[in-house]
Image (spheres, helix red, strand yellow):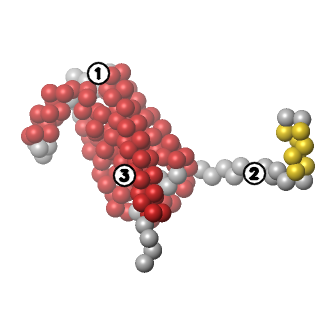
């Protein structure tokens, strides 16, 4: 088979067909294989939903929240979104098996952050703050970078481990 690239004939060049597979569908398949991570992710999602959609932003009023965490979050304001959304992303990013699936997770969670902030416009004593969105997105990106590095490190360790 001869293909022309930039006007020059090239023998043996075969173009691979792009097979579209939904990142979300494959993510669900992988999630079923990892029920512990899926459970952790869903619990985290429920917790973030509850805390984001409360009428009071003060975490000290949540009776089951550990006092140390509540004081830290109330003191640091919008920065608490950085670790919260970063930790929320970790189980879902570990479920995702490819970079494309991880990008799907990050985009879905980024849209969720924006949706939570927009809903806060209609809640009493809550405001929509672009700084909260930025800190949430930064947490997502930091978690994504950490998971990519973790995967590269662990895959490299597996390749260098001698088989017995």
Find the distance from the CA under tag 2 to the CA under tag 3.
32 Å
Find the distance from the CA under tag 2 to the CA under tag 1.
48 Å
Q: Residue 139: horizontal and vertical position, in percent?
A: 34, 35
Q: Quadrant of the C terminus?
A: bottom left
Bin the neighbour count of mark 2 within 10 Å (Cα to Cα): few under 14, some 14-19, many 20 and up: few
Q: Residue 84: horizontal and vertical position, in percent?
A: 28, 39
Is 45 on the left-hand or right-hand side of 60? Answer: right
Is 10 on the left-hand or right-hand side of 18? Answer: right
**Helix, strand or loop for disc 3:** helix
Q: Residue 58: horizontal and vertical position, in percent?
A: 16, 30
Q: Residue at x 38, y 63 (%)?
A: 35
Question: What residue would you read off at disc 1?
Answer: 127
Bin the neighbour count of mark 3 within 10 Å (Cα to Cα): few under 14, some 14-19, many 20 and up: many
Residue 74 or residue 141, whichever sits in front = 141
Question: What residue would you read off at disc 2?
Answer: 17
Q: Residue at x 89, y 35 (%)?
A: 7
Of pointers 2 and 3, the one earlier in the residue sequence: 2
Residue 59 or residue 123, whichever sits in front = 59
State if disc 3 and disc 2 touch (CB < 8 Å): no
Find the distance from the CA under tag 3 to the CA under tag 1.
29 Å
Residue 163 visible in the shown view: yes
Q: Which mark is residue 34?
A: none
Q: Is residue 159 above or below residue 64?
A: below
Residue 18 or residue 130, whichever sits in front = 18
**Helix, strand or loop for disc 1:** loop
Is 24 on the left-hand or right-hand side of 91? Answer: right
Q: Which mark is residue 91?
A: 3
Q: Is residue 14 above or below residue 53?
A: below
Residue 150 or residue 50, whichever sits in front = 150
Of pointers 3 and 1, the one earlier in the residue sequence: 3
Query: Splitting the image into 4 quarters, where does residue 114 fall?
Result: top left
């Amino acid at each position: 088979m001869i293909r022309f690239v930039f006007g020059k004939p090239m023998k043996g060049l075969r173009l691979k067909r792009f097979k579209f597979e939904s990142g979300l569908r494959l993510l669900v398949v992988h999630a079923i294989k990892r029920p512990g991570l899926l459970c952790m992710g869903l619990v985290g999602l429920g917790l973030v939903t509850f805390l984001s959609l409360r009428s009071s932003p003060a975490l000290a009023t949540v009776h089951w929240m550990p006092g140390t965490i509540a004081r830290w979050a109330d003191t640091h304001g919008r920065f608490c979104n950085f670790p919260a959304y970063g930790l929320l992303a970790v189980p879902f990013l570990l479920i995702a098996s490819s970079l494309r699936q991880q990008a799907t997770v990050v985009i879905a969670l980024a849209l969720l952050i924006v949706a939570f902030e927009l809903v806060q416009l209609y809640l009493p004593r809550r405001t929509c703050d672009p700084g909260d969105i930025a800190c949430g997105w930064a947490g997502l990106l930091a978690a994504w970078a950490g998971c990519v590095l973790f995967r590269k490190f662990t895959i490299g360790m597996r390749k260098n481990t001698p088989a017995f």
